[in-house]
Amino acid sequence: MAALPKRYDPQTEEPRLQAFWQAQGVYHFDVDDDTRPVYSIDTPPPTVSGHLHLGHVYSYSHPDFVARFWRMNGYNVFYPMGYDDNGLPTERLVEKWEGIRAVEVGREAFIERCLAVSEQAERDYQALWQRLGLSIDWRYTYRTIDAESRRISQLSFLDLYRKGLAYRKEAPAIWCPECQTAIAQAELNDLDRESTFYTLAFALDNGGVLEIATTRPELLPACVAVFVHPDDARYARLIGKQARVPYFDQWVPILTDPGADPEKGTGAVMCCTFGDAADVTWWYTHNLPLRVALDRAGRMTDLAGAFAGLPSREARRQIVEALAERGLLLGERPTAQSVRVHERCDTPVEYIVTPQWFVRVLDFKDALLASGANVRWHPDHMETRFREWVENLNWDWCISRQRYYGVTFPVWYCDACGAVILAGEDELPVDPTTRAPSRPCVCGSTSFTPETDVMDTWATSSLSPQIVGQWLANPELCAKVYPFSLRPQAHEIIRTWAFYTIVKSHHHFDATPWTDAAISGWGLALEGAGKISKSRGGGPMPPMEMLEQYSADAVRYWTSSTGFGKDSIISEEKIQIGAKLITKLWNVARFAERFLMPPASPPSSSSPPHGGD
């Protein structure tokens, strides 16, 4: 056994030890071991949407500490890794890196580019995780675009559909004009910005004027009603009467609803189909007509007349000018406004009526809350975030996306009768755009239209326990590791990954997917600078450079400086302190080495003990 070198060189010693651990299978899970208790970790599959940064190093180190703790306590630890590489985040990355647009290059060519970019990114991700020293069992690695993940995701859809939990409906959906797809409520963020309240003159049938303030005059052609609060005495005499929309001249009813805020604007609110979620609610509740003034690209439709084809912002400017020219603009004032934007691109969303696939969640709030309460959250106040999200849900989960790169729906539509044709379970995974159903429709027709939408990436990653547990391919393994012991994840995706995983586990197995959820904070680049993001540049310190400069253990020293749920400023000073600590521990080991080394063999009797003296 060679003695430890006098000087510690992490660039030499760490890779040597990491290679030894991998070669010896030190971190392998033993599926045949029935003597030790199992501790299983539902590791977050990083989204392929850019370069990993020190914030990822911070959060991914924490479950590694947990894995090592339970391993040292005699547990058979199942600690896998995956990559979330299907769906919109990867598409956006490819469009950005390759300088292309999916609609410009076509479905097949774009999918090829997505696969190539994903494979390279995942090689880079794995190199970083291994250099960091994560004690992963790399034999259990998956991609959410691989064949088994697609098989499980499609089987999940078939099961939900047959149970009546997945349905297709032409209904208002949250739409991102930039990404050109429907999105789910969980993918929305709030953006505060300055806007303008325009006070407009709505004509009354008695010759009077009803003043209404709006920030979106471009939606006037889509106006279908005016709402006032039922207790607002200013408008009591107008309830049930009609008002004429300025410039566009359609007559609309004046109705009451408690959702109309007497303190906002003039207290009278125009309802357009659709400007926001309140419009959608009023449309459903009051059975209003549908007038569509914006198309999927965020441009005005023919309903806008002379303004048709204009982007909404330009249409707003021109419509305001036209209103002013006719004396219908009574005033304007600046106002602070909070708008809902798509988290992926910060584009304000619209509400467009399109056919979409949904998974039922609104009917199961109580059951989902009970399942969330079964989880031990670390820190425990994170359960409140889960609870508040579920309690305030207003939409079922929209799982269809009008994009290319993702898991396809195993569905065709009969051209003769419109019936939904499902693929057989033995055919999965299947791409309906490349092959026809294996059987005719019940009506006898053999002419079909494939579903071209793909599933939301969360529809697959919400099955991470089943995917990594090999639900279909290895039931013995799945029985050992599921439900999982731990779900480590970031707090901003409690509303998505945690929630959707609980939804899928409830709908499929009536079970809670894990015992504990450990919620990490963010790595922050500077004091008050906010979360760093791989899709927006990844912050100022490349993690591999930091590992090479200071060592993995030094960086891990910084990552261990806070607990679950807490943000941490990326501190080079703490990393330097960690490097000094590791050197001290090395020197302690060198000192102790002389007491741990086996004694030297005694000299041979035929050799003089002192060189012949």
Image (cartoon, rainbow, N blue to C red):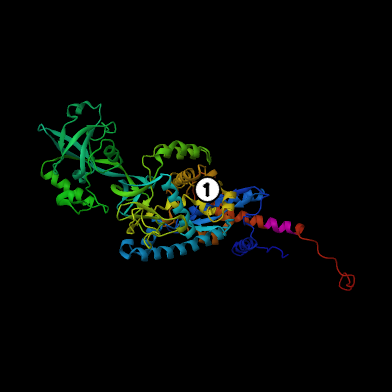
Q: Position of residue 354 (x, y in %)?
A: 29, 49
Q: Position of residue 448 (x, y in %)?
A: 33, 58
| 7 sits left or right of 319 in the view | right
Q: Which residue is mark 1?
A: 488
User: How busy is the neighbourhood of tag 1: few (under 14 within 10 Å), some, or many (20 plus)?
Assistant: many
Which amino acid, mark 1? Answer: Pro
Disc 1 secondary structure class: strand
Residue sitting nearer the eye, 561 or 274 = 274
Majority secondary structure in the magenta region:
helix
Q: Position of residue 260 (x, y in %)?
A: 27, 33
Q: Is residue 115 visible from the viewing direction of this image?
A: yes
Q: Quadrant of the N terminus?
A: bottom right
**Height in image: 476 above or below 204?**
below
The structure residue drawn at horizontal position 40% and vertical position 52%, both measured from the top left corner, is 456
**Height in image: 80 above or below 197?**
below
Q: Is residue 298 magenta?
A: no
Q: Is residue 267 visible from the viewing direction of this image?
A: no
Q: Quadrant of the C terminus?
A: bottom right
Task: Return the residue found at the far bottom.
Answer: 612
The magenta stretch is: 587-593
| 506 sits left or right of 23 in the view | left
The part of the image, by quadrant, that contains residue 28 is: bottom right
Q: Position of residue 466 (x, y in %)?
A: 51, 51
Residue sitting nearer the eye, 269 or 293 = 293
Residue sitting nearer the eye, 430 or 436 = 436
Residue sitting nearer the eye, 561 or 503 = 503
Q: Is residue 590 magenta?
A: yes
